[in-house]
Amino acid sequence: MTRRSKTVIRVSAVERCILALLLLAFPDVVMGFITGSQPRPPAWLARVLGARLLTQGLLEYTRPQKVVVLTAAVVDALHATSMATVATLSPRYRRLAVASLAEASLAEVLTSALARQLP
């Protein structure tokens, strides 16, 4: 693994952990920032996402290995797919689903690209 790849993975993991902590501590504020006056899903749902992101971020930070990074990319791709479904089927939560879809898609692209550089 190149030192640069490891650094980028860890920086990305820190970003993921910060987002996770915000979702865990202030789910209504984070969702409100994205949705504005539109309806929001229950706060517990944001906390579940926060817990998943925190776990994933901590694993990526502490074990920046190919198998961990590839698994993270798969999890992000699955999340993006689920958010595309929500955005399509639920106009009520579309804005929030599209924001989550965009974040998960960008994370998947980044982690997939980094995984190719790992031994």
Image: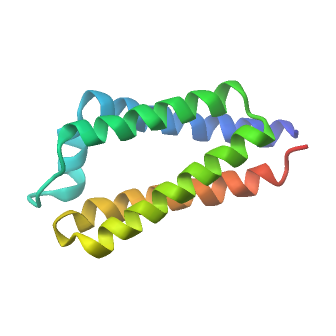
Q: Residue furthest bottom?
A: 88
- Left or right: 116, with 96 as reference point: right
Q: Tag count in the figure?
A: 0
Q: Residue furthest left?
A: 37
- Left or right: 15, with 20 as reference point: right
User: Which residue is more in the foreground, 5 or 63?
Assistant: 63
Q: Residue furthest top?
A: 62
- Left or right: 48, with 56 as reference point: left
Q: Quadrant of the C terminus?
A: top right
Q: Is residue 91 above or below residue 71?
A: below
Q: Is residue 51 above or below residue 45?
A: above
Residue found 58% across the figure and 36% down from its top: 13
Q: Position of residue 32 (x, y in %)?
A: 17, 49
Q: Quadrant of the N terminus?
A: top right
Residue found 79% across the figure and 42% down from its top: 66
Residue 36 figure quarter: bottom left
Colour scheme of this structure image? rainbow
Q: Position of residue 52 (x, y in %)?
A: 46, 36
Q: Position of residue 20 (x, y in %)?
A: 41, 34
Residue found 27% across the figure and 27% down from its top: 25
Residue found 85% across the figure and 45% down from its top: 118
- Left or right: 39, with 116 as reference point: left
